[in-house]
Image (cartoon, coloured by chain):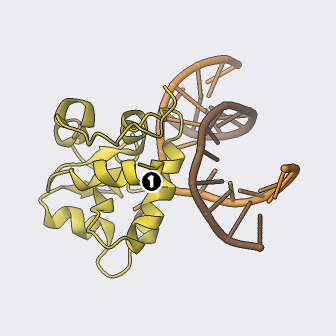
Chain colours: A yellow, B orange, C brown
Amino acid sequence: MTFNERVFFVVRLIPEGRVTTYGMIAKFVGAPKAARMVGWAMNRSHEQQEYIPAHRVVNRNGLLTGKAHFKGESMAARLEREGICIKENKIQQLDSLLWDPFNEIEIVPKAFYDDLNL
DNA sequence: CGTGTGACGGCGC
DNA sequence: CGCGCCGCCACAC
């Protein structure tokens, strides 16, 4: 799997009403210092066939830094519709909503780490 | 090939 | 607390 494919795989597992951060995803896909690339992957996520809940990815402070890239329903509205409370463009109670892939993902595809030089 | 550009984050000051 | 710097790496040109 490529970097983007690994990122998409993780994002697709985020449940409704929960969020995770660019940095956490970057760590999980084996590129801990490439959080920016996760954001870039989210840009490309629209072009994917499968549904990728990109609105559930926020920055480490809970800010909706990617909101400019959502067409139609806004990023904030999508999150609020899932029961998440947002004030001043920021997720409230981030700690209790945070979905950490390292704690939550039990099984990864065999091919997940294939392209990774560990 | 080279360079610029990010939906970021960690660290230093 | 708020900057600024820089590593990171996929991709467009």
Of A3 and A40, nearer the camera is A3
Check disc 1 and report its element: helix, strand or loop.
helix
- Using the image, determine if residue A116 lies above or below residue A3: above
The front one of A54 and A47 is A47
Mark 1: few/some/many CA within 10 Å (<14, 14-19, 20+): some
Q: Above or below — where is A114 with respect to A87?
A: above
Q: Amino acid at mark 1?
A: Asn
Quadrant housing residue B11? top right
Residue A91 percent coordinates (x, y): 28, 50
For image coordinates 24% across by 70% down, the residue present is A77
Q: What residue sits right under mark 1 in the picture?
A: A4
Q: Nearer the viewer, residue C4 or A115?
A: A115
The chain holding disc 1 is A
Viewer-closest of C6 and A5: A5
Horizontal side of B13 relative to A76 (left or right) equals right
Where residue A6 sits in the image (x, y, percent)? 37, 48
Give the left or right position of residue A104, taking residue B9 as reference: left
Identity of the residue drawn at 47% across and 40% down:
A115
Q: Is residue A77 left or right of residue A57?
A: left
Q: Position of residue A57 (x, y in %)?
A: 33, 52
- Relative height, residue A16 to residue A71 (above, below): above
Q: Is residue A63 visible?
A: no
- Give the residue furthest to the bottom: A72
**Residue A73 visible in the displayed image:** yes
Which image quadrant is residue A49 in?
bottom left
Which residue is at a point 18% across and 37% down the rendered structure image? A107
With respect to residue A103, does A73 lie above or below? below
